[in-house]
Image (cartoon, grey):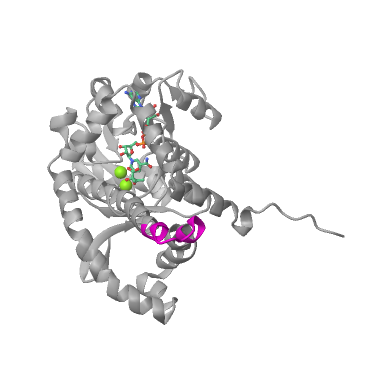
Amino acid sequence: MAKLKFGNVEEEVVTREEFPLEKAVEVLKDETIAILGYGVQGPGQALNLKDNGFNVIVGQRKDSKTWEKAVADGWVPGKDLFELEEACERGTILQYLLSDAGQIALWPTVKKHLTAGKALYFSHGFGVTFNEQTGIVPPKDVDVILVAPKGSGTSLRRLFLEGKGLNSSYAIYQDATGRAYERVVALGIGVGSGYLFQTDFKKEVYSDLTGERGILMGALAGMFEAQYQVLRENGHSPSEAFNETVEELTQSLMPLVAENGMDWMYANCSTTAQRGALDWRHRFRDAALPVFKQLYESVSSGNEARITIEANRQSDYRVKLEEELKEMRESELWQAGATVRQLRPERQPQEDTVN
Ligand SMILES: NC(=O)C1=CN([C@@H]2O[C@H](COP(=O)(O)OP(=O)(O)OC[C@H]3O[C@@H](n4cnc5c(N)ncnc54)[C@H](O)[C@@H]3O)[C@@H](O)[C@H]2O)C=CC1
Ligand SMILES: CC(=O)[C@](C)(O)C(=O)O
Ligand SMILES: [Mg+2]
Ligand SMILES: [Mg+2]
């Protein structure tokens, strides 16, 4: 494993250089990898593994939209696409990629087919960490491993097709065969990770739930709404308020942060912006800190897991979700966004060229 410095802290990471794809294929050549669930992570991981030369089958409920999606993606019923239970039976590595709540419902079936020496793979530490609530307690004679891509399954596939990769964390919860390490790393490389950093199931789920409720999704949406509201209350037009809140961030400034870090983005802005942002940064951090502390507490106490499981259990979960997303979509902020996006030069209809 390569030792790399992250600030002053040294961590061990697995890179593709030391664990190339050929080695990964060799390690798993006698395995059948069963991807259970074909939602968001399922397709990304299954297609990347297949294109990378692994033996992959997909398990999905028949007569569902995602079964049809799997067929449309080239999986063939009876050949490499099966009902969930049949895939559990055929697979030697079961990649449990149902929604975290769906995993609770299917657990008795999966458990039945976890015979000695198989591996149970997760992309989230949720089911195992919160097992008092989920009931997911794997048998002792199977490997229990995790590869969690740090991004959407959609990005995992897109980046793979562009010849790039997403970073993933990996963890071993149980090593029954002595092969858990080589299995998990081979799978991590196989699903298209750039590099793999080590964690454990609990740390993975605590950090992931904090991140998505925090800056990645929850805090991001909340901060957008707050700034947009203040600009609007002070008489700024929707397009001005949207441009100064979202469009400039996603189109101009975040790509600079992604490329070379925050200081580099700052260095490429005006001296006026630099002075103000360097001052206000402290106030925003101080205002947000107590909320982030509450959030972490709500995650680590199991409260967030409870809320999630309870919400997902409702039969009208999808209907209610769609209502909430519709409300967001139809808010003035995001309606303004729809118009602003249409006006991006690359989305404008091409003018007819005159000879
Ligand atoms: N969405 C993402 O990009 C990411 C997801 N993850 C993790 O990956 C795992 C899979 O997540 P997603 O792909 O988002 O899942 P999802 O919500 O898209 O659902 C996946 C599949 O579960 C099936 N399903 C749901 N309930 C079921 C039930 N009761 N019985 C049978 N099938 C059922 C659905 O038909 C669907 O095919 C989760 O552990 C999640 O936390 C990790 C990183 C990112
Ligand atoms: C995409 C991802 O990694 C998230 C936000 O944590 C998730 O979808 O659960
Ligand atoms: Mg998550
Ligand atoms: Mg995540």
Indicate the position of residue 95 as horizontal and vertical percent values: 33, 34
Q: Identify which residue is drawn at 62% across, 56% down.
A: 346
Residue 128 vs residue 354: left or right?
left
Image quadrant assignment for residue 61: top left
Name, please, the residue furthest toward the bottom. 271
Write down the region rendered in magenta.
Answer: 230-241
Indicate the position of residue 335 as horizontal and vertical percent values: 49, 47
Residue 228 vs residue 199: left or right?
right
The reply to whether the magenta stretch includes residue 191 is no
Q: Quadrant of the N terminus?
A: bottom left
Pick the residue in front: 129 or 65. Answer: 65
Q: Identify which residue is drawn at 30% across, 27% down.
A: 102
Q: Is residue 264 above or below residue 123?
A: below
Q: Quadrant of the C terminus?
A: bottom right
**Secondary structure, magenta segment, majority class:** helix
Indicate the position of residue 289 as horizontal and vertical percent values: 19, 60
Q: Identify which residue is drawn at 29% across, 36% down.
A: 121
Pick the residue in front: 311 or 283. Answer: 283
Image quadrant assignment for residue 115: top left
Regarding residue 251, the answer to whether it shows in the image is yes
Regarding residue 114, the answer to whether it shows in the image is no
The reply to whether the magenta stretch includes residue 234 is yes
Q: How many discs mark residues in the rendered view?
A: 0
Q: Is residue 110 above or below residue 180?
A: above
Q: Identify which residue is drawn at 37% across, 69% down.
A: 261
Q: Is residue 205 above or below residue 86?
A: below
Indicate the position of residue 110 as horizontal and vertical percent values: 27, 24
